[in-house]
Image (cartoon, grey):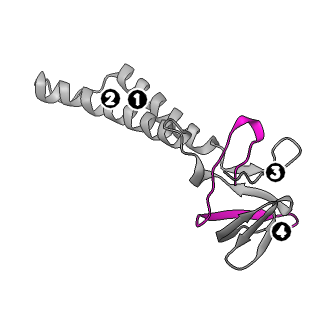
Amino acid sequence: MSSPGMGKRFKIYEGDEIKFRLEGEKYFNVETIKKLNGDSVFLQNSVVNIKDISVVDIRKYNQHRMNPDVLAGASVLAGAGYFIVDQFNHTVVKQRGWNVNGKVVRTSAILIGVGIIIHKTKRRYFKVNKKNKISIVTF
């Protein structure tokens, strides 16, 4: 199963677990895909037509090397690492004692803040509508 909307594809295979919400429901369902056929998804406990699915949780399927999770984590680590390396340089290498440089604190805080903002604003769900459609592609 893939979603060709907006030029992105999220590949979900038979045997994978999928988290989705049906039209008119408030809660997400989590089930294992047993078979994909035409417009139907055969799940462990039911059969669902892809037209009945309103939202799919895509956090698990974003498999790009530089996805938002990786960028957010790298930014937070870079900010904290920069501060720690600068303090190590002052105290151990130069033997000047504890000294907090305002420019280093500002740069570290910006990197950490950007990482937190990326983490909070990343796309978590694929909403099915006229532009974003779910389709089953067989090879």
Could you say where residue 116 lies in the image, as x and y percent from the top left? 53, 40
Q: Earlier in the sequence, mark 1 or mark 2?
A: 2
Q: Secondary structure at mark 2?
A: helix
Give, as a single range, the part of the protein colored magenta.
1-24
**Tag 2: Cα neighbours inside 10 Å, few (<14), some, or many (≥20)?**
some
Q: What's the residue type where badge 3 is placed?
A: Val
Q: Which mark is residue 128?
A: 3
Label 1 – label 4 distance at C-alpha: 43 Å
Name the quadrant containing residue 106. Answer: top left
Residue 126's tag is none
Could you tell me which secondary element the residue under label 4 belongs to?
Answer: loop
The residue that mark 4 highlights is: 25
**Answer yes or no: do the residues labelled 1 and 2 have beta carbons within 8 Å?**
yes
The amino acid marked with disc number 2 is Tyr
Q: Secondary structure at mark 3?
A: loop
Residue at horizontal 58%, vertical 67%? 15
At a point 68% along the width and 68% down the height, the residue shown is 35
